[in-house]
Image (tube, helix red, strand yellow):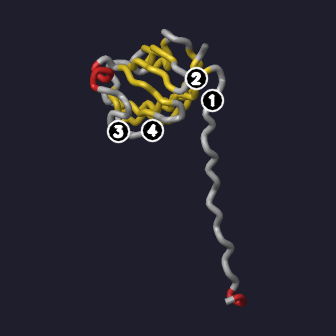
């Protein structure tokens, strides 16, 4: 069985021109496989440790740290750089070494092509202006 992950990478430079890049990739991996080769560190960031239908356990590179809280990880898992991802719920990691800042947002999509579809966001409608003679 294979698991599907979506990884969004946002890279921000800390020095001029302070540019920002955004890239989203989808990976289909099996237990024990490394994925998301990051050119800045010349290694893969994640490894699938375990898959359990609606959740997956992923090990992450030691140079990354969890962002915005602990999510559903316990302290022992964090010490081992391991986190359980729940289907459709993104988890963010930070990398702040050198002249760049990087955020990795990983979302477990499910197993064998049973992906969680992102909800479609409808554009807000702008009301037509009222003509003066209609006031």
Q: Which residue is mark 4?
A: 20
Instruction: Find out whether the residues at labels 2 and 3 contact each other: C-beta distance under 8 Å.
Output: no
* Distance between mark 2 and mark 3 Cα atoms: 23 Å
Q: Which mark is first along the chain, 4 or 3? A: 4
Tell us which disc is closer to us: 1 or 4.
1
Q: Which mark is residue 4?
A: 2
Q: Is residue 134 above or below residue 79?
A: below
Q: CA distance from mark 3 to mark 4?
A: 20 Å
Q: Position of residue 83 (x, y in %)?
A: 39, 24
Q: Secondary structure at mark 4?
A: strand
Q: Are marks 3 and 1 in contact (CB under 8 Å)?
A: no
Q: Which mark is residue 115?
A: 1
Indicate which disc, 1 or 4, sits on the residue closer to the N terminus.
4
Q: Sequence order check: which comes first, mark 3 or mark 1? A: 3
Q: Nearer the viewer, mark 3 or mark 1?
A: 1
Q: CA distance from mark 1 to mark 4?
A: 28 Å
Instruction: Name the residue: 68% across, 81% down.
Output: 130
Q: Is residue 127 left or right of residue 65?
A: right
The quarter holding residue 20 reads: top left
User: Residue 82: which numbered mark, if any?
Assistant: none
Disc 2 and disc 4 in contact, CB within 8 angstroms: no
Measured in 3D between alpha carbons, the distance from the residue under mark 1 to the one under mark 2, in whole angstroms, is: 7 Å
Q: Nearer the viewer, mark 2 or mark 4?
A: 2
């Amino acid at each position: 069985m294979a698991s599907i992950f979506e990884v969004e990478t946002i890279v921000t430079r800390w020095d001029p021109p302070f540019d920002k890049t955004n890239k989203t990739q989808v990976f289909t991996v099996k237990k024990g496989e490394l994925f998301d080769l990051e050119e800045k560190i010349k290694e893969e960031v994640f490894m699938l440790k375990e898959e359990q239908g609606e959740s997956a356990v992923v090990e992450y590179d030691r140079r990354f740290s969890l962002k915005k809280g602990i999510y559903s990880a316990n302290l022992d898992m964090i010490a081992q750089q391991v986190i359980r991802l729940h289907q459709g719920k993104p988890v963010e990691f930070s990398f702040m070494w050198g002249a760049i800042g990087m955020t990795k947002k990983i979302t477990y999509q499910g197993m064998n092509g049973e992906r969680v579809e992102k909800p479609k966001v409808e554009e807000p409608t702008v009301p037509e202006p009222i003509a003066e003679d209609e006031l």
